[in-house]
Structure formats: structure tokens, C-alpha cells
Amino acid sequence: MKIAIVGTGYVGLVSSACFAELGHEVIGVDIDEAKVKMLKSGKSPIYEPELEEIIQRNLASGRLSFTTELSEAMPGAQVIFSAVATPPNADFSADLRAVFTVAQSVAEHAENDLIFVNKSTVPVGTGKKCEDLIIETLRKREVPHRIPVISNPEFLREGNAVHDTMQPDRIVVGLNGDAHAKQVMEEIYQPLTRVGKPLLFMTRESAEIVKYASNAFLASKISFINMISELCETTGGSVREVAAGMGLDDRIGPRFLHAGIGYGGSCFPKDVKALIALSKQTGVPLPLVKATHDMNNRQRQRFFKKILGTLPPNANVAIWGLSFKPKTDDLREAPSLDLIPMLTRAGHKVSVHDPVSMEKAKAILKKKVTYAQSPMEAAKEADAVILLTEWDAFRGVDLRKLKETMRGKELFDGRNVYEPAEVRDAGLTYWGVGVR
Ligand SMILES: NC(=O)c1ccc[n+]([C@@H]2O[C@H](COP(=O)([O-])OP(=O)(O)OC[C@H]3O[C@@H](n4cnc5c(N)ncnc54)[C@H](O)[C@@H]3O)[C@@H](O)[C@H]2O)c1
């Protein structure tokens, strides 16, 4: 089937490459000319394991192509996916301008019946608004085309995006009774349903809510264990032991029970915020969502306060890890971008190392920090090392060598990756989250 995917970011690009890999003919559309130029030459503008190989293979086979022009992508396409960003506005609501722009452009360029599939994370009711906009645009053009709007939220995790797209836990499709659209979506996902992946049909409103409810639930699990970590710090427990004791309960499970400096990234913070905004708009209280957000801020600030309260004046500080989590170069809402300006404003000198996101970081942090080629280079003559992202490269460092490399001995472990006793044996002072 010929598919057009508008927006070739973390979601749209992975979907484009994977749909092509599954045998569809895919054209990715993006307004970012530099991105499209890179993609046409077989280079991925984002770091995502396995992605570049799939792009190159499918460009070569002719099943995948890219353009900056929606009008070029639409002829022959039966389905248009929209995967544009929905970042938070200042009032926490989701900025839906890109979604509406795409819906309107699709209606302006349509030459036949189509299906518009919204893959972006959008508040409940957005599908209806897109549909109204499309109907109005088609009416003004005086053309008879039908373009139903379907919700197909995306659940991939950055760093595992290809795997999650090829092996999804579930595929959710929300539509309000359009039999043809249902059949087309079944056909698109047939390569996955054939190998047993569940395809769930539900109303468009339910599908829109599933996405926010899933992210808010996961974020609340993180905030819950972070809340318990503070209790552990004050009373003498270890949050690792508590999490191990909780996680073996089948009803709870061990995942998302790792205390740390809180969640970041382009999804959890913004989706939790969007639900808070939706609570205000609808009058539905959603108190757990607000508590999840507040707890996340509190956890980050508590850790930063410990760091700033411990450093000597004009300290040398090494930051290990800039991306919001390992295996991605995504810096959106990363703790590093919060902490580094605090450190530099306080007069400290900061040296950073990250295995993949240094180039992206340079565009944001510019000359405010020094960029080190290795963890040890960053730690040279440092008073403190602060681990913010649990990349494997940081887990295995020789702690005794680290002690010799540093001039001070503070090790702040924002992700609880080290054994406190091992750190102390190496002559360093350990600062973890909810552990001693
Ligand atoms: N990143 C994730 O892990 C993830 C996971 C699940 C769902 N989502 C959701 O998917 C959506 C996209 O997220 P993302 O991380 O891929 O965003 P992104 O910022 O990486 O990509 C969005 C892309 O859309 C392009 N774009 C914007 N307006 C356009 C237009 N009018 N026409 C064509 N292209 C346009 C941008 O240039 C950009 O390349 C968001 O709603 C997000 O919440 C993201």
C-alpha cells in the first residue's frame, strides 16, 4: 500500500522506515529541508539503533523516499499519517498547530478519498477537530472527497524505537465506525498481526486517551518510587531494597521502579502537563497526574540542591550523560539542560561527556561547557562527577582510576547505577537517590 507520513522526527521517521521494511511503499514528508536532504542521502538525522541501516536498505529498494512537498507525496497514497510534534504550550496544553496545519494541507491537496491517521499524541477531541477542519476545507473547495480521521497513537520508546515498531506490545486504532478505514488499517498492520501482535480497535476518543493514560501511568510509577526514595533518605531505608521487595509482587512488577532524578524527555513531561491542562479544561480533577508532575520537579530539585550545597566555590564539575536517557540523542527536557546553567551561574566550570548527544548539545550549550572525548577526560581534576544518564559506558568505569583522575571525591549518582560500598572503597564520597 502507498502511505505518506508527514513529519520525519523520532516517530515519523521510524514509522516510515519500518512500514517500508514491512513491504509498504512509503514517502516521508518534512518541512525541514536539511533533514530531508540528509534522509535522501541515506543518513539518519537522529540517533536510533538500527534505523540508518533500514533507511538505506529501503531507499535502495525504492520502497522509501522523502520530500519536502506534501503535494508531491499525496498522489496515489491511500493513507496519510501525521506524526508532527505536539510540544507543550506555556499553559501546559499541547500545541496542536502543526497537527491542524497538516490536516488542512491534506484537505487542500486531496484529489480523491483518503484516510487521515493521526499518530501524534493529542488530547481527546483533537481527531474530531481535525475532521471538522477537513470537512470545512473540502466544502470550500467544493469537492466530494471523504477523508475520515483516525487515531493511531504511537507507543515506541526512543532508544528501542525500531524494535518497538516491529514488535509492538499492541497497536491501538481509534475510529468511529468507518468500515473501509478499519479494513485499510488491518491491511497496513497485517505483517504484524500475522505474527500475533494485537491490533485493538476502539473509539477515536478512547484511542486518544489510551496514549495519555499510558504515559501518565508510567510517569506516576516513577514518581511513586521517587517519593519513597525521599522517605528512605530520611529514615534510613534503601529504595533499591524497597523496590526489589515491591517489584517481585506480580501485581506491581519491577519495571519503572528505579528511583533517580526523575523522568525527562519529549513525552512524559509534556504528556503529564497536557493532562493537567485537560483537567482544567474539562473540570475533571485528575489529582494523581498533578501529584506526578509535582513529585518529578521536587525530585530533580532535591538532587540539584544537594549538588549545589556540596560543591566548593569555583569547582570543576564533570557531567556524565546529557541525553534524557541512554541510547538516544534526544535532549528535550533532559536534566542536564536544567542543571548545567545552574552550575555555570554559580561560577563552576563544567566539562561534559555523552556517547552520542555531544553534537546536539553543542548547538544548545555552545561554549558554556567543555566537551570531553571520554568520561575520564571530563573527570580530570574534577571536584565532583555527576552521572545524569545511565549509559553503559559509565557503569563500568574503574572507580579507583576515577578517584586518581579527580582532584575532589564527590560522586553524584543521579541514576543509582553504582554500589555505594564500591564507590566508598575507591575513596570517593557517594551521593545516590534514596540509598546510602
Ligand atoms: N519521541 C517519542 O519517543 C514519541 C513516542 C510516542 C509518541 N510521540 C509523539 O509523536 C509526535 C511526534 O514526536 P517526535 O518526537 O517524532 O517529534 P519530532 O519533533 O522529532 O518530529 C516532528 C517532525 O515534524 C516536522 N514537521 C513539523 N511541522 C510539519 C509540517 N507542517 N509538515 C511536515 N513536517 C512537519 C518537523 O520538522 C519534525 O521533523 C508527538 O506528538 C509525540 O508526543 C513521540
Image: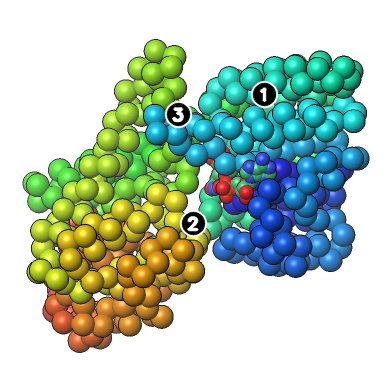
Does residue 434 appear in this view? no
Looking at the rendered image, the disc whose residue lies closer to the viewer, 3 or 2, is 3
**54 or 136: nearer the viewer:** 136
Q: Which residue is mark 2?
A: 330
Which residue lies at the image location 20% right of the left edge and 53% below the top edge? 303
Is ligand 1 closer than 8 angstroms to the Cβ of mark 2? yes
Q: Is residue 237 above or below residue 142?
A: below
Q: Position of residue 409 (x, y in %)?
A: 15, 75
Look at mark 3 in the image and give the residue it sits on.
93
Examine the rendered structure and indicate whether residue 258 appears above or below residue 346. Answer: above
Counting residues from the start of the chain, the first of labels 3 and 2 encountered is: 3
Query: As shown in the figure, which amino acid type bears the numbered disc 2?
Result: Asp
Q: Residues within 10 Å of mark 3 (few under 14, many from 20)?
A: many
Quadrant assignment for ligand 1: top right
Is disc 1 in contact with disc 2, using a CB cutoff of under 8 Å? no
Dot placed on the residue nearer the N-terminal end, 3 or 1: 3
Q: Nearer the viewer, residue 351 or 34?
A: 34
| Residue shown at the point (79%, 65%) measured from the top left | 57
User: Foreground mark, 1 or 2?
Assistant: 1
Q: Is mark 3 within 8 Å of ligand 1?
A: no
Residue occupied by mark 1: 130
